Image (cartoon, helix red, strand yellow):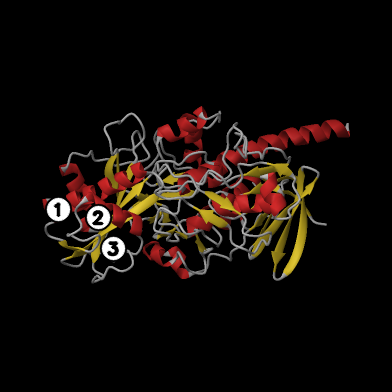
Amino acid sequence: MTYYDYIVIGAGSAGCVVANRLTENPDTTVLLLEAGNPDTKPEIQIPFDCTTLPGSEVDWGYLSEPEPYLNNRTIFCHRGKVLGGCSSINFLVYTRGNTHDYDGWESLGNPGWSYQDVLPYFKKSEHQQRGADAYHSVDGELSITDIISPAPISQRFVDAAVALGYDYNPDFNGIKQEGVGLFQLTVKEGKRHSTAAAFLVPILARPNLTVQTGTLVTRLLFDGTRAVGVEFLREGMLHQVRVNHEVIVSAGSFDSPKLLMLSGVGDTAKLQAMGIPVVAHLPGVGQNLQDHIFVPVPYEATQDLHTATTSNGCGEVGLFLHSESNHEAAPDLELIFGPLMWVPPGYPHSGLGFSGIIALVHPENIGSVSLRSPDPKDTPVIQLNFLQSQSDVQKLVAGVKLIRQLFCTSAFDEFRDREVAPGADVTDDVALEAYVRETCCSVFHPIGTCKMGTDSMAVVDPELRVYGVEGLRVVDASVMPTLITGHTNAPTIMIGEKAADLIKAAGSVSKQVQKAIAK
C-alpha cells in the first residue's frame, strides 16, 4: 500500500495552492488528485476565449434541478474539470470582496478570519503589476495585471457612472470597494494565469509531489472516525492510497459535500436511505448553498467596438453599489460591463454590441447539494432556489433600470443602438420581473456547502477540520459561511493559503508528538 503524508483532492483554485505550500518542505510528501485532464486546451490560455469554456470538455457540465421560482427552468452550474479547476475556466476577474465580508465571518464564530487576519494571505499569493503597498504585494506567485488596451466603450461606461454620481475607484481591492473602475485580471504575459499555471507548473519537478489527472475519487477511507486514505477510479481501475497525516478535500462546493456524503459523513437519515454506512452525523453537509445571481441587458452597437485584444477578459469594468441608502454595510449590487453581447436565449441580435450585467451579490436564497445515488459517477442534485425572495427580485429589477439609465447617458450616444433584451417596450415592473425570472443565471460562484462555524449546521471548524472525524479538512469555497461581495476565485486562493499554514502547524505538533513517543 502506498502512503503519502497528505492527499489533496482537487487541483483547483485552493488545491493547487495547498499542494504548493505543503511541498515546500522536502520531507513532506503530497499526492494531488484531479478528476479532469491537464490544462492543454488552447482556449484556456486566451483570456478573451473564456466564454467558450463553460459547457466544454473542461467543465463538469452540471445543471440545477428545475427551479420553482424561475418557471421551473434548470440553471447551468459550470465547474472546472481540469488542472486549475475554475481558475482555468472563469472570467479572470480578480476581486477579493469587502472588509465587512470577512469581519462577518469572524462574527459568526470563526476567529482568525477577519479582514485584517486574511489580508496577509491575499497579499502572500499576489504579484501585483502596480507594485507593493499596504494592500498589495509583489512577492507572490499569482500575476495580477491591469487590462491591456481596454475597449474605448469601456471608458464610456466609467464616464457614464461618474456622470450619475458614482465615485471612480482605481482599485476594488484597496482602501474601499464602492465605485466604478476597470477590473484587474489573473493574466501573465497576455495569458490566463490560473492556479495551475501559477502554483503547480513551477513545482512539478519536486520529488515529494505526485500529481495524477483523470482520477475520480470515489470515497474517503476511514479507520473508525479517522480518515486514513482515499479510493479512486483511474483508467477504469479502482485504487486505494493511504495517508500519514491528513486528507484535504478541495473538490469545490458541489463535489466536496458529495464526496463527504458518499463516504458516510452527512445527515444520518439521508445516508441510511442511500444505504451508505454512517461515519459521522453532520446534517450541514450539502446545506447552505449560496450563489451570486445575474441578469444581462445587451445592446446592439452602431460600430465596431475594437475588442481585438485577446489578452483581455470579457468583463472589463465593474461598479459596486448599494441598492438602498444604507452605505454602512457592503454593497449589494455589482454591475459588470463588457464589449460583447451576453444575450439570453430567444432574443435575435446582430452579434455586434455590448452588455451590462447586474449581479446580486448578497441574495437571500439558500439552496442545497445532495446525492442522486450512491454511485460516485452520478451528478449531484443541485437546488439553487434562486429568487425565492421578492426582495432579491426587486433589487435585480432596480439593477436593470440602472443599466438602462447608464446606457442612455450621452457617453453612449456614439455607440448605442437597439436594446436587445429585455427590449425597449418592456418598461413596467411586472414585465421586468418576468424578464428577471426568465433570464437570471448563476455567476458560477457557489459557496457554503461545507461551511465553517460553531453552530449545529457547521461542517468544519475555524481551522477547516471536519467535525466528528479526525485527519480530514475541507479547503475550498464550500467552507465560506456567507457570500463575499465580489468574485470568488481570489478568496478561494486565500483560503488555500491560510489552510496550508494551519495544516503545517498541525503537522509540526504531530511530528513533535511522534518524536516524544519515539524517545
343 up-or-down from 498: above or below: below
Q: Secondary structure at mark 1?
A: loop
Q: Secondary structure at mark 3?
A: loop
Is residue 263 something one can see in this rendering?
A: no
Q: Amino acid type of disc 1? A: Cys
Q: Amino acid type of disc 3? A: Leu
Q: Quadrant of the C terminus?
A: top right
Q: Amino acid type of disc 2? A: Ala
Residue occupying the point 11% across, 52% down: 410
Q: Is residue 71 left or right of residue 286?
A: left
Residue 450 position in % (x across, y down): 59, 44
Is residue 430 something one can see in this rendering?
A: yes
Q: Closer to the camera: disc 3 or disc 2?
A: 2
Q: Is residue 466 left or right of residue 510?
A: left
Residue 374 position in % (x across, y down): 69, 59
100 up-or-down from 231: above or below: above
Task: Write down the residue under mark 2.
Answer: 431
Q: Nearer the viewer, residue 265 or 247?
A: 265
Q: CA distance from mark 3 to mark 2?
A: 25 Å
The crowd level at tag 1 (other Cα within 10 Å; few <14, some 14-19, many 20+) is few
Mark 2 or mark 1, which has the lower sequence index?
A: 1
Q: Nearer the viewer, residue 58 or 358?
A: 358
Quarter of the figure with residue 392: top left
19 up-or-down from 82: above or below: above
Q: CA distance from mark 2 to mark 1?
A: 20 Å
Q: How many marks?
A: 3
Q: Closer to the camera: disc 2 or disc 1?
A: 2
Task: Write down the residue under mark 3.
Answer: 340
Mark 1 or mark 3, which has the lower sequence index?
A: 3
Task: Write down the residue under mark 1.
Answer: 408
